[in-house]
Amino acid sequence: MFNIQFERLGPIQVDEQGKTLLEISLDKGVPHYHACGGHARCSTCRVLVLSGEKNLSPPTDAECEMAERKGFGPSVRLACQTRVSGPITVRRLVLDDTDAEEAYSVDKPRCDLGSSSGRETRLAVMFADIRSFTPFSGRTLPYDLVHILNRYFAAAGEAIRQHDGYIDKYLGDGIMALFGLRTEDLQTGCRDAVAAGLSLLDRLERLNHYLEEQFGERFEIGIGIHAGVAVVGSIGHPKRRQLTALGDVVNVASRIESANKEFSSTFLVSDTVFSYVKDRVKNGRKIQASLKGKQGTYDLHEILGSSETGPPLITSTAQDRLRAVLETHISRIDAPSYLRLAFHDAWIRLATGGKSCVTPFSQSLQRKENLALIPNMDILATVKDQFPRVSFGDLIAHAGAYAVERCGGPRIDLQFGQVDRDGPAEDNDFPFYEGISLPDAKSYFLASGFLARDLVALSGAHTLGLASGQPFTHDPFTFNNQYYCRLLAGDTRAFLPSDMGILDDPDCVHWVEEYARDEQLFFDDFADSYRRLTQSNPQAEEAIF
């Protein structure tokens, strides 16, 4: 005999072991939601275990699947699957119809950064804000204002993404970003955040040249970073949720950014952040500041740049160095051409034995439909001058991956090691052309070791670019899942025969529906399929660089 303590309800005496928590609740008259009848097909019976975890059975396969889908931590259990052998204390998490509707219908965002249920995470928080923006907006035409802000946020976003940051939100002319979500390592998060801040200042200087030349304006910004423990979870209406961080670390970071105005500084970090980067940065003043709404004083440190003598703030990989060069050449406007070039090379390589075939003098580039790709290859030839040991195959694959990221898609990390052919492939080696049917494309995919899922995911590349002068989607320079949404809506005016056939294939249409519903799933699968398509013989970076 033992007791089960339901928080806010009091103890319940249990006479026998081995029953599920839901069975015990129903036997004892405890109001306990179970919308699916106790079959682990919903999560309305979930509880938070406050004590006595050792007296619970291990999670079943069905419970593990639900926990992964919803993003539950180990302390959240399904009452219908959890058998009790001793005293425990739990809190019911679904108490009314509104709770039940949300628990039944809302899945975890398919993203490895967070979940719909909150968790405590060690991270760094960065705020950046444009100085004197209100008078600037008052003297600027509305179109120009939006255009300039988007140029600024594009630069800030690239700096944040480059250093594994997550853009939490835009606050008018400000931006909030989180670092360390993937690793939950405070040192890594702080170093990434400071590196992103310095990168943002560098990009801002380049943007200011443009603003001064075109508009006679110049932006000055303030950056503030603090680090610590925050609560991270997806917040908002069920149809419009966003991962965010909550807690004192966020408030302090915001106050540190605001302190730049008082001390006529640009980049301030807390003592916590500074402790992780002090040997890697050039620092200016140490400031004791009273922060608005906070008691006591805070030691703040002014960051002036990266250290010239200490270890690098961020150890860049070979791919990072190549990406930094590609970034100066690939804009959103020409990104679709680089992605098309990557597919073009990959298809030929599959058909001709695993070696890259596309070089600036390739026979395949002289075909009428490919002439527009020649300028892209000319640019990659200049990049190759800086990386002479990198093959054209690797350059093309990395350019396509960066093109996707540049247009808002996922970052696709690739290795090096593709080998170029001694001579170009023959025209008849090229397996795809604009008139190919879906059955032929699918047969080629299957014969090459890919699945229908890969075919559908890679077809999503048509979210970028044009076909016969017409865009596949409403915005041909933004990588998203609109290709699938338009397919399902029947809006297929610019689509190719192979696109049209996807809806008629039972193996493919399921994935069209999944990707239309879940953009992050599409991003994950596209990155995986692209990586396997463009890489066949990866080698260690040291062998290439």
Image (cartoon, rainbow, N blue to C red):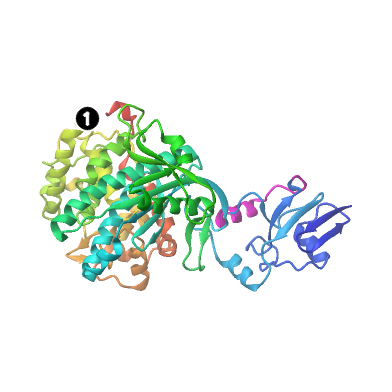
> Dot 1 corresponds to which residue?
389
Relative side of 504 to 344, left or right: right
Does the stretch in magenta take in 316?
no
Query: Few, some or many C-alpha atoms within 10 Å of disc 1 (few <14, some 14-19, many ≥20)?
Result: few
User: Is residue 96 in sight in this rendering?
Assistant: yes
228 or 105: nearer the viewer = 228
Amino acid carrying mark 1 in the image: Arg
Image position of 103 with respect to 270: above or below: below
Q: Residue at x 31, y 57 (%)?
A: 131
User: For the point 36% across and 28% down, which residue is it?
Assistant: 311
Q: Residues in magenta? A: 54-71
Report whether 541 appears left or right of 53. Answer: left
Q: Main secondary structure of the magenta part?
A: helix
Instruction: Name the quadrant of the C terminus.
Output: top left
The quarter holding residue 48 reads: bottom right
Q: How many marks?
A: 1
Tell me if residue 328 comes above or below residue 540 in the rendering: below
Report which quarter residue 149 is drawn in.
bottom left
x, y (%) of residue 29? Answer: 81, 68
